[in-house]
Each structure stands twice: as C-alpha cells, then as structure tokens.
Amino acid sequence: MASENSTGGVATDHDKNSASLVTTDASSSAGPAVSASESSSTEVATSSGSSSAAPAAGSSGAESMTLRTLQQYRLMAADPQKVEPLTRDGTVAQFLAYVLEDRDEAIVVEALHTIVLLCASSSSRRQLARTYGLEPALRCLKMKDSGPEVLALADRALSELNRSAAPPAAAGATSSPGAAREKPRPAPRPKHKVVTLHVTGLVTDGDREELESLLVRVRGMISIVFDMGRGRCTCRVRDHVTVGTLGSAVDRTESMAAYQVVRGADGDSEELVPVSKRAKALERPQEEKLPEYLPEDDGDAPPAANAMAPGGFFKQASGWLSSASSYLSQSFYW
C-alpha cells in the first residue's frame, strides 16, 4: 500500500523479500531529502568518535536533533573561552543532566564528553556540581549495565565534580606555591552596633511614640526596642552613628533626658553617662570647696572692755559648802 509523503513523493511499504526502502519521486525535492539524510548520518558517525555508533536510519527526528545539539555543545566546550559562558547558562547544564537518561548510548556518550570538557575550569566545575540532578544521574549510569566507554566517562565526570568540593586553600596550594603563604584575611567587622539609652520621662505610650518618631529619623537607625518598665530603649544603629546624635534626638522632646547605659569593668554593674544636653544640665554640680574652719585657740585675742571675772565671794561660798558636806559625811556615817 502506498502513502503520500510530506514532500510530495509516494513511498511504498517494506517488501517481504527486500531490506531496502524504495521511494518514487513525485517532485525534484524528494531526491535531495534522501541524500541529506545519508550525509547527516555520515557526519554524526564521524564526529562522535570511533567508539560511538551512528544513529540508525530509522531513528526519530527528535533523537537526531538531540545528538546534533550535543555535538555542537561538545565543539563549544572544547574551546576554553566558551566554557564559562556555557556553564553560566543554566539550561545547558540541565539539558546535559536530562539526556544522561536517554536510551541511545551515542547521546549519552556525547553528553559525557561535553561534561568532562566543561569540568576543565574550576568555576565551571562548581557550577556543574550545583546543577540539580546531574550528580545522581552520573551515579545511576555507573549502576546500570552500560558499555565500558559510558562507565569510564561517568567515573571521570564524577571525579571531576568531586574536585569542586575540595577546600579552596588546598586547591590553591597545588596550583600556586605562593598561595599557601598568604595570610588569612581578618574577619569583617560588624557594620552595626547596639546602644542602650536610659531615658528619664519615658512613662506613657504617648512618650514612647514621640521618642520613636524622633529616633527613626536618625540616618543609620536600624531598629528600636523599648522597655517601658525600666525606661530604656535599645537602638541598633550603623557604625557611623554616634551616641551624641541619639542624645540630640532625645533633646528635641519636651521633657526627656537620655543617659547611655555602660557596663562596668566587672560586667555586672552599670553606669549612666549623660548624652543629651538636658541630662547634662540635670547632673548635680560638684560641691564647692568650703573655707577652712576658724582656729579654736583665741588666746591672742584682746580682752573685751566689759568682760566679767569671778570675784572672791564665789570662792568662799564654794569652800564653805565643801566643808559642811565633809563634816556631815564623817559624823553621820551610819
């Protein structure tokens, strides 16, 4: 039975005693189509190497397109300048991981050759190692009953991907002797700091809202946490924000004063340091030094004009009293 071809020709079914496909041309376009198919099969067999078999004449068009795409990827991967652009394109790595499960061994071999070529660069190895499904697909190939070439390429690709997991310092030690002598970089300093303020006058929710509206305007403010029970607010700010800037913001309120809470040397005690102008003004001034006490010895002072001195009468009275008391105590001793 004959069926009409898409090119306009008529093709006959396989004969029982014939192994070849006979085509009859209805137009001049059928002949070139057959010759192009033969030339593409010859090209595929040549580029895939002596170990990979050419696709069969009856293979689907999708498999041929996949194989031609992989051959182009392999040619591009052989160029060192095109390796990194290929790996930066995430669709290429995902495509390579997908075709590793194909039943056509020629497609799998081309994909493995491309992966090995892409692993020549360290940055490309790290990118391929992060590709979802690529490493599990290579392990499945080693567990399947595949050909020796597929097993050898899968093992090599896995070993190349595992190199990307090595520490950068160890990898650099083998590539450049001077890298091992490099000093470790210091840890980056935190870009923020925490300042705790004790605010007098922070009592009601209205006070909190007023203070919050002023502090959030400070350039570099990250977050504010209020502790209304203790009258404190904890500010997380950038490094360039000074404590005086926060104190100036508190000064813009009507009745609040700010003190910075500083830990003592023992780590337990706290000290309040005034940081706002109002707080500094409320600080008790230092006691003025009092003048020295007057000397108690006034022997050199001149006597007053109206001073009174005890007379002899007082001396006689005291003597008589003392004589009478001694006589009574001796006479009436019982």
Image (tube, grey):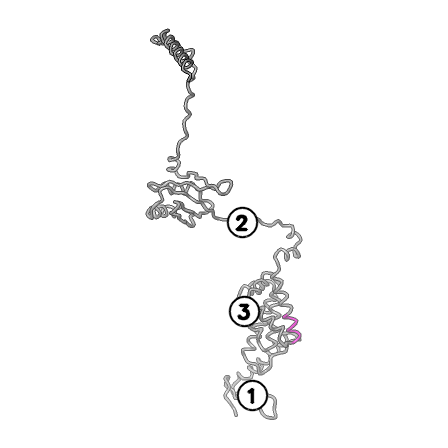
Does residue 153 show up magenta in the picture?
Answer: yes
Q: Residues within 10 Å of mark 2 (few under 14, many from 20)?
A: few
Q: Name the one closer to the observer, 259 or 52.
A: 259
Q: Which mark is residue 220?
A: none
Q: For mark 1, what is the residue?
A: 23
Amino acid at the residue labelled 1: Thr
Question: Residue at horizontal 41%, vertical 22%?
Answer: 291
* Direction front: furthest residue: 334
Q: For mark 2, what is the residue?
A: 188
Number of marks in the rendered image: 3
Q: Please state which of the two labelled residues, at mark 2 or mark 1, is closer to the viewer.
A: 2
Q: For mark 3, what is the residue?
A: 94
Location of the C terminus (image quadrant):
top left
Location of residue 73 by image quarter: bottom right
Q: Residues within 10 Å of mark 1 (few under 14, many from 20)?
A: some
- x and y percentages locating residue 118 in the rendered image: 60, 65
Q: Secondary structure at mark 1?
A: strand
Answer above or below: position of 132 versus 178: below
Q: Residues within 10 Å of mark 3 (few under 14, many from 20)?
A: some
Left or right of residue 73, residue 286 in this image: left
Lower sequence index among marks 2 and 3: 3
Q: Please state which of the two labelled residues, at mark 3 or mark 1, is closer to the viewer.
A: 3
Residue 144 visible, this angle: yes
Amino acid at the residue labelled 2: Pro
Q: Secondary structure at mark 2?
A: loop
Residue 309 visible, this angle: no
Location of residue 257 by image quarter: top left
Magenta stretch in the rendered image: 147-154
Does residue 76 show up magenta in the picture?
Answer: no
